[in-house]
Image (cartoon, grey):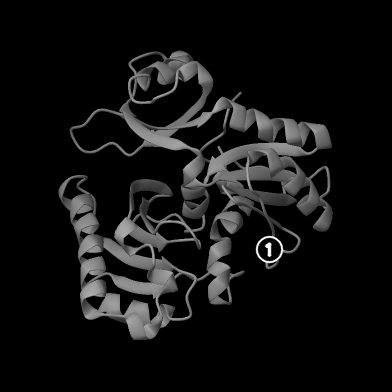
Amino acid sequence: MKLPFGKRKTGTTRASVYIRPQLVQIITSHKPDRLFEQAVNSQDEWASAIEALAKEVRLERQSEIVVILSSQLYQQLQVEKPSVPDEELASAVPWAIKDMVAESVTDLVVDYYDAPTPPMGGAKLNVVCVRRPLIQRLVDCFQHNGWALTGITTESLAVASVEAPSEHCQMLVWQVTGSELELLVLKDGQIFFSRHLRAFSRIAQLQEIEFSQDYFDSLSLELQRSIDFITASLKQPDVSQIHLSLSTRFGDHIVELLQANLSAKVSLLEHAHISEPEQFDHLPLLGALQSEVLP
């Protein structure tokens, strides 16, 4: 069973389903401004939640459906690319991570995509692994209902596809409610660097009266450290743009506070289907609607 991480062009009618530990969400390309969601208590309720939401949005069987997994449902590792012929790579990668995961690799569904190679470094792969029963549960649900499951991707890859590919380095600082703050550094459509900023996960919940200079000085410092790593260690150009995707009505103020400390241009992410702050929570789903999200 293969999880198609990466980029591929497919057809036109699309739907995206975002699986989170306590929530299942869906949007369709027909009404990308409308999000439908249902709370769940366990994986046992995924199928019934997907079926209920599919009925609510009148999901067509011929639609191309992409499933997005939240970060709590997969593990991502970076490894040296095995020195084997390309046709043997898929079978070699699981054994390259066998000492890095708690489960037996035979109990995991493993996929990979190319990681940017630093100067003078060997080729690397980003490897994503998911517990096999979790994937089987989703596949069974789609097969039972006769829907076309185009692929399964990660939330970071879905979010990254929202940014237009650029030869310049761009940083996207994003979060959905209830998850950690994450930064992605992107270049030429690839994720060059990613990092969770756990100390700042309440940023979207802060009221303006709670803002402090120390808080945003510290966040600016963490962003600058990541920028410095990109230039010093990966030998890439400076980050020219920093886009924020935060579900808070104080986004403009946060931009101002960060811009005061950073030389890169800071702005809120612009998207055709995001007009209200709470719609930044839709970002992974909007990204998965795009054909570029899958290989």
Q: Is residue 141 visible?
A: yes
127 vs 139, nearest the viewer: 139
In this picture, is 2 found above or below 268? above
Q: Is residue 212 left or right of residue 160?
A: left
Q: Residue at x 67, y 32 (%)?
A: 137
Kindly indicate the quadrant of the structure image that contains residue 86: top left
Q: Is residue 125 left or right of residue 71?
A: left
In this picture, is 38 found above or below 261? above
119 vs 277, nearest the viewer: 277
141 vs 220, nearest the viewer: 141
As drawn, which residue projects farthest toward the left? Answer: 232
Locate the N terminus by quadrant.
top right
As drawn, which residue projects farthest toward the bottom? Answer: 209
73 vs 110, nearest the viewer: 73
Locate the C terminus by quadrant.
top right
Residue 131 picture location, percent across and down: 53, 29
Residue 50 picture location, percent across and down: 74, 47
Residue on which the image places disc 1: 35
Q: Is residue 197 visible?
A: no
Q: Is residue 27 left or right of residue 114?
A: right
Q: Tag count in the figure? A: 1
Q: Residue at x 46, y 53 (%)?
A: 160
Amino acid type, callout 1: Leu
Q: Residue at x 48, y 44 (%)?
A: 72
Secondary structure at numbered mark 1? loop
Disc 1 crowd, CA 10 A, few/some/many (<14, 14-19, 20+): some
Q: Residue at x 53, y 50 (%)?
A: 158
Residue 199 picture location, percent across and down: 30, 60
In this picture, is 29 found above or below 60? below
As drawn, which residue projects farthest toward the front? Answer: 41
Kindly indicate the quadrant of the structure image that contains residue 278: bottom right
